[in-house]
Structures are given as structure tokens and as C-alpha cells.
Image (spheres, rainbow, N blue to C red):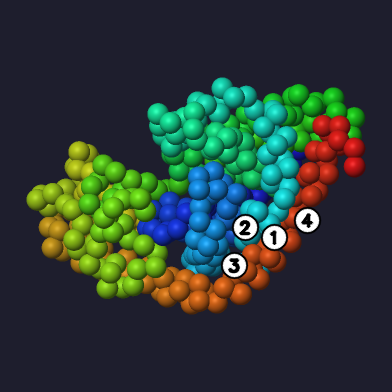
């Protein structure tokens, strides 16, 4: 079956979006609009697998939507919406809960990381959320999902669920006159340079909003002065930049900053080293700060403008949800017939 070339991606509204979210995900959304139908979702249902203050959740949902738009996602060309407005996500997730196996869920690395030693006391939603993630993707029969290394396991699960559904219900799918490949086997779109952005204070740790040091991350709402100061204060080693990319091995902070420059400038690390190899941090950091301010500060200004106009953001989300619902209901109407539900 020839599926429409469609991209789906979602970001949790957990607050304080940072450079890692931008370079690892949001920035990549923009060029995909030229080659695929794109659906970008604020996955607020995923967010409540752990406790969220309702006011904070609403604020963070609008912040993510503002980031999409400020980064260049066109809400008329692509679909931007928040997940909870399209009830078919939850409906398909329940069907998938009955397709997936507990063993599949308990092996998810992120569940192990988040649950830790307290796995008996975490919410059922935290265990089952990869099933909801599969529903997010397959509800729109998305053919591609942009993923980083930490999400590849979940996409594999999505592929397994799609294949198992197609196989388990093969006769019913045929009886409905539908293509036997009802759900696509979604392909990953692997990210380019610097998709895993590390802390500015410790190159061995991923950039995170949970880090107690605000200096460890660049927030997408930081102004130009804050961006420049954080980069100039970033931890480095005493050696100048190496003459070759191989020389970055074992130099986590140097590798991270070179990767950030490469991603912001749409270059490879090889090209960055060709320009800055052998130069000291007194040369490289100001150049990186200037580049980061040029790229990020205008986006921060636009995000702040949008956040201060919540009615406009909400209107974009409602309009996107309406378009998403039309696609979602087409899929769910078939799914209900396939599994034997009477409507």
C-alpha cells in the first residue's frame, strides 16, 4: 500500500524548553514541511503520567505551541494541536494496550530510568505510555517520525504493534476490504549533528530542565544577554580545539560545543573544525555566542509575543485539532470495524 508521506512528532509540555529540545527536535520540524505532510503535537496526555499542576500544564502547552510557530512551523501548512483535544488518541491507545504485551512495556529503557526502584508505585500510565505513543503515530498512519537515539526503542515498539495488529486482524481487515498493511511500519528520520545536546556545565550529562544549575542549559526564552553569558561561562578543558574531528574523542565539553555550533550553522563538525581547529576558547566561544544569539534570540522574542497572546495560541490549537480529528476519525472508524465494535 502506498501511504501518504506523513510525519508525526510530539513534544511533552513539561516546561522550560531548552536548546536541546530545539536542536534535537523542533528545528528539524521546519524543513520537513517541504517534503511531507506534517503533524506536530503537544502531547499533554503523556505529560500527566507524572503529576502536573493544571495551571502549569496549560502554560507549558502554550509554550510548546509557541516554540513550534516561532521556529518556523506554519500552522496553516502543518497541523499543530494538543493531544487531549483529539479523543481518538486515547481510544486507539486502549486498543493497542490490548495488542501490546506487558513484557514489551517493562523492557522500555525510559520506563526503567523514570521508575527506578519505585516501579510498583508509579502510575499505570507511565508503564503504558509507549502504547499511547504508538497510537499518536499510527492514528495518522505516519510513515516517518524524527527520532533521537533515546526514542528509537519506542519507535521499534510502534512498529511491533503495527505489525501485530495487521497480523492479528488480518482476516477482519480483508473482510472489510482494506489493504492488509492497514498500519504502516513507520520509519525513523534519524537526526543530524548535535542531536543530543549535553549540559554546558558537564559534558557527560544531557542538557535538562531538571538540572539545578540554570547555567547548564540555554532556555528558549533566554534573551540575547543570557545566551551569550551562558556560552562564555560553559565548562571547557584547557586545550585548544583539535586540528581534526578525531581529536574531540574523550573531550566531552569540546565535542558538545562544536556540535552545537555545527547544528546552529547547518555545518558538519568536520567543517567547524576546519575553521576553528587549533584555535583557543577565547576565539571559539565568542563566535559560538554570536551565532547562538543570532539564531535563538529572534525566536525567543517571537515566543514571548505569542505566549503573551494566549487566545491566538488557543485558536491555532483548536484549528489544528479540528484538522487532526478529521484524519483520526477516518482511521478509528476502520479500527472499530476491524476489532468488532458496533456503532
Q: Are marks 2 and 1 in contact (CB under 8 Å)?
A: yes
- In percent of the image, x 28 and y 69: which residue is there? 226
Q: CA distance from mark 4 to mark 2?
A: 15 Å
Q: Are marks 3 and 4 in contact (CB under 8 Å)?
A: no
Tag on residue 82?
A: 2
Q: Is residue 140 above or below residue 94?
A: below
Q: Nearer the viewer, residue 162 or 87?
A: 87
Q: Are marks 1 and 4 in contact (CB under 8 Å)?
A: no
Residue wearing tag 3: 74
Q: Is residue 36 visible?
A: no
CA neighbours of label 1 inside 10 A, class few (<14), some (14 to 19), many (20+): many
Please identify, in this view, whether the residue under mark 3 or under mark 4 is nearer the observer. 4
Q: Is residue 181 visible?
A: yes
Quick one: label 4 or label 2, which is nearer the N terminus?
A: 2
Q: Nearer the viewer, residue 232 or 43?
A: 43
Tag on residue 321?
A: 1
Amino acid at each position: 500500500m502506498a501511504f501518504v508521506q506523513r510525519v508525526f512528532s510530539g513534544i511533552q509540555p513539561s516546561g522550560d524548553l531548552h536548546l536541546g529540545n530545539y536542536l534535537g527536535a523542533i528545528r528539524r520540524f521546519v524543513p520537513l514541511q517541504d517534503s511531507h505532510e506534517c503533524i506536530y503535537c503537544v502531547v499533554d496526555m503523556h505529560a500527566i503520567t507524572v503529576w502536573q499542576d493544571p495551571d502549569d500544564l496549560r502554560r507549558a502547552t502554550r509554550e510548546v505551541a509557541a516554540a513550534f510557530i516561532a521556529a518556523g512551523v506554519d500552522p496553516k501548512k502543518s497541523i499543530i494541536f494538543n493531544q487531549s483535544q483529539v479523543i481518538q488518541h486515547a481510544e486507539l491507545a486502549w486498543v493497542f494496550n490490548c495488542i501490546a504485551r506487558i513484557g514489551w512495556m517493562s523492557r522500555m529503557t525510559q520506563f526503567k530510568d523514570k521508575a527506578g526502584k519505585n516501579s510498583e508505585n508509579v502510575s499505570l500510565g507511565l508503564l503504558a505510555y509507549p502504547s499511547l505513543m504508538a497510537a499518536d503515530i499510527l492514528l495518522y498512519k505516519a510513515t516517518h517520525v524524527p527520532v533521537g537515539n533515546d526514542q528509537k526503542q519506542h519507535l521499534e515498539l510502534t512498529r511491533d504493534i503495527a505489525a501485530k495488529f495487521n497480523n492479528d486482524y488480518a482476516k477482519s481487515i480483508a473482510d472489510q476490504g482494506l489493504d492488509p498493511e492497514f498500519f504502516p511500519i513507520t520509519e525513523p528520520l534519524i537526526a543530524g549533528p548535535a542531536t543530543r545536546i549535553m549540559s554546558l556545565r558537564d559534558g557527560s550529562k544531557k542538557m535538562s530542565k531538571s538540572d539545578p544549575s540554570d547555567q547548564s542549559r540555554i532556555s528558549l526564552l533566554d534573551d540575547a544577554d543570557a545566551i551569550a553569558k551562558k556560552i562564555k561561562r560553559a565548562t571547557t578543558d584547557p586545550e585548544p580545539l583539535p586540528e581534526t574531528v578525531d581529536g574531540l574523542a574523550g573531550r566531552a565539553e569540546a565535542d558538545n560545543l562544536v556540535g552545537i555550533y555545527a547544528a546552529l550553522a547547518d555545518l558538519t563538525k568536520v567543517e567547524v573544525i576546519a575553521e576553528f581547529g587549533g584555535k583557543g576558547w577565547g576565539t571559539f566561544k565568542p563566535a559560538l555566542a554570536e551565532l547562538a544569539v543570532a539564531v535563538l534570540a529572534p525566536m525567543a522574542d517571537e515566543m514571548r509575543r505569542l505566549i503573551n497572546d494566549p487566545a491566538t495560541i488557543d485558536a491555532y490549537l483548536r484549528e489544528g485539532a479540528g484538522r487532526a480529528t478529521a484524519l483520526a476519525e477516518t482511521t478509528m472508524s476502520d479500527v472499530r470495524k476491524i476489532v468488532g465494535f458496533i456503532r
